[in-house]
Amino acid sequence: MTEDDSAPLLAVRDLERHYPVTEGLLQREVGRIRAVDGVSFTVERGETLGLVGESGSGKSTTARTILGLETPTAGKIFFEGNDIDDLSGAAERAFQRRVQLVVQDPDEAFNPRMTVGEAVAEPLALHGMDDADRRRAIVTDLLERVGLAAADSERYPHEFSDGEKQRLAIARALVVDPDLLVADEPTSALDARVEAEILGLLADIREAYDVSILFISHNIDIVRRFCDRVAVMYLGELVETGPTDAVLSAPAHPYTRLLLDSVPSLDPTDRGLPEPLTDTVPDPADPPTGCRFHPRCRSVIQPDGVDLPTDTWRAVAAFRFTLDAEALPDGLDDTAAVRETFDIPVDISHEGIEAAVDGAAAAVASGDLDRARERLAAATSTVCAARRPRRRPSTAVRSSATATTIRHLVNRSSRTEKSLSTRKRSEVSERCGDGGEAKHPRPKAAVLGIACGDSAFFPKFLRGGRARGPRVKSGLTSCRPCRRPCRPCRRVRRRARRPRRRHRRSRGRPRR
């Protein structure tokens, strides 16, 4: 896999993931669920991109497709300028190592029969490290860096709290030194204090080791505090992307404004939360034409030649789109009940709209829903159903205040009081000195897999892919701070060999 420094770390182009809908004995395809439909975005090196949207918008499916857990229907995914569909062999293994997932439920990441030390060290064994002592030393050091104790490696997953399990899931993802973390709702099941601690840990890791993060969340307030850029997703499409401050301070799309207004206010007198025009989310197998949010949008545009008051037009549009979604409530036996349910005035100033509403209400009362849809659709056609709004251009802007905001979210305990960046600088100064002269660690440290320079956190034993720590040159490795060869860090690379299993004799059968 060739490395292109000018290309973004991750680039997604027109990604689609459709699930066929089949029926009958021959399983003929009669439709498709468009979980992801034409998504495009980039993630730069050292950047945090927030992918935000309500449940069912396709965020997790996008993440799983990027990781290769789902096969894309169409589109391309590029990692450092390389199409991941063309990767094979060592290049494919390097990509799988450099992109790691932090799942929403940490219980899914751990085997209850394995200790957490064995679970965190398992990726090391899968990628070729067969030295058990070295794996144990790396896991012990890593657990301390994520705010846990070294002795916790002998415990089982059920002995930890939810916040500690999420720290273990982050440690398991970091153990193979990834360049990109895909964090799928890592704080959704946590309370506010533990949520702030996990966000602070991710911010420290990003600043100390220049790790890019694709942060998936339905909480736009967390994305505001943590991410450099934001991409808003609805019903399989991106409706708005851009720098976090620019998008959230002046949102251009009504769906983004709805997400922002849904964040509870600290004002005790502000008890009202805005609601969409209709509560029914459209079917992904049959999405609306034009702007996919227009059946629920409170800013839906009126037809040409119609100038109704805002409240009146919203009431008429809610009646039409609720009727299209087949979500009418019970008890609509007459025209007056229909108008009262949707707060439609008795007399509408526009004659065409008044006649359409009156005829549709009478059709609903008589049970002829098809006729009611036809009357309303002909009189309330909107440009939102024919054209998609243009998205603003996306630019990668790194917010310098992001890490500062996260670091002040929580007062860390005594175990996490010393930040990762401080520990990294102390290790570099101890081994390389203030003048840049290499002070090589003892050979014993190299045997345990603790390298020199700023790579002390991560092992650099893997073949293929880019290593940000010691770089292989003529059989030697060089420290990143001093750029000098370091013989004690030289390691022999061997394939992981599976030990032979000896057949155990049955105790009840006598030997012959």
Image (cartoon, rainbow, N blue to C red):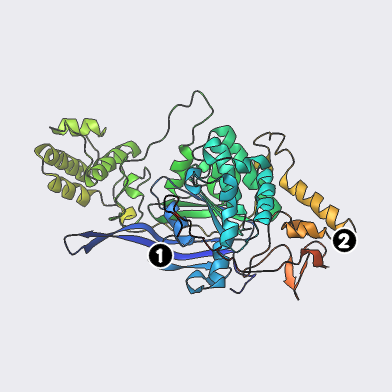
Is residue 79 in sight in this rendering? no
Q: Which residue is mark 2?
A: 436
User: Which one is nearer the viewer's eye here, 148 or 352?
Assistant: 148
Measured from the top left, where is residue 423 in percent x and y? 76, 47
**Compared to 500, does 243 lie above or below?**
above
Farthest right residue in view: 435
Measured from the top left, where is residue 284 in percent x and y? 31, 53
User: Which one is nearer the viewer's eye here, 438 or 256?
Assistant: 438
Which comes sooner in the sequence, label 2 or label 1? 1
- Find residue 414 and name its label: none
Question: Residue at 18% across / 64% down in the picture?
Answer: 26
Distance CA(mark 2)–CA(mark 1)? 48 Å
Would residue 232 appear left or right of 139 to someone viewing this image?
A: left
Would residue 408 appear left or right of 67 to someone viewing this image?
A: right
> Mark 2: which amino acid?
Gly
Measured from the top left, where is residue 241 in percent x and y? 51, 55
Q: Secondary structure at mark 2?
A: loop
Q: Which residue is mark 1?
A: 72
